[in-house]
Amino acid sequence: MVTMEIQDAVEQLRAESGVAKIFSEPYETSDGTTIIAVSRLHRRWRGDPIAVPVGVFSIRDGKALWVPATDQSRIALLGEVIGLAAAVIATLAVLRRPPWPDLSIQGE
């Protein structure tokens, strides 16, 4: 049975991993795909550790597919920070003029 093989693989991953990972119970969908969610324990500086989603194993027809979880808000925040830094650098470049005088060529 495929479920027993999956559980054996999950137990092996738990034993080999140095990081505390949390695997959900295998869930089988109506089309025969088995899904296992994976999380890791994130230890906060103050307070209890929380489970952070890492991704999902999707198993169908004996083939496993790993789908990583992405934090879209973190990616958007990074883009905003880079845009702000670029705007500050451009503003400083425009406002801070070189110490030498302006040179201009005057026609005849």
Image: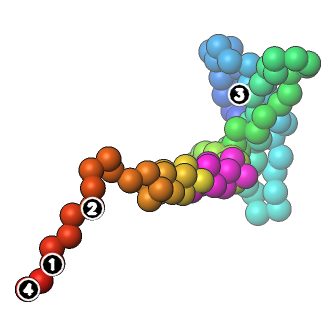
Residue at 27% over, 61% down: 102
Name the kind of residue labelled 3 in the image.
Val
**Residue 71: mark in rendering:** none
Q: Which residue is mark 1?
A: 106
**Residue 108: mark in rendering:** 4
Mark 1 burial class by Cα count in 10 Å: few <14, some 14-19, many 20+:
few
Q: Position of residue 86 (x, y in %)?
A: 51, 54
Q: Quadrant of the N terminus?
A: top right
Q: Nearer the viewer, mark 2 or mark 3?
A: 2
Vertical placement of residue 89 versus 49, above or below: below
Vertical placement of residue 62 versus 45, above or below: below
Is 72 covered by the magenta stretch?
no
Q: Position of residue 101 (x, y in %)?
A: 27, 56
Residue at 78% over, 24% down: 41
Looking at the image, do the residues carrying marks 4 and 3 touch, with CB atoms under 8 Å apart?
A: no
Q: Position of residue 90 (x, y in %)?
A: 47, 57
Q: Give the secondary structure at mark 2.
A: loop
What span is in magenta? 73-83
Mark 2 burial class by Cα count in 10 Å: few <14, some 14-19, many 20+:
few
Distance CA(mark 1)–CA(mark 4): 7 Å
Q: Give the secondary structure at mark 3.
A: helix
Q: Which residue is mark 3?
A: 10
- Drawn side of residue 41 relative to residue 93, left or right: right
- Residue 108 in sight from this viewpoint: yes
Q: Which residue is mark 2?
A: 102
**Total marks drawn?**
4
Vertical placement of residue 80 versus 5, above or below: below
Q: Nearer the viewer, mark 3 or mark 1?
A: 1
Distance CA(mark 4)–CA(mark 3): 84 Å
Location of residue 103 by image quarter: bottom left
Residue at 75% over, 47% down: 35
Is 77 covered by the magenta stretch?
yes
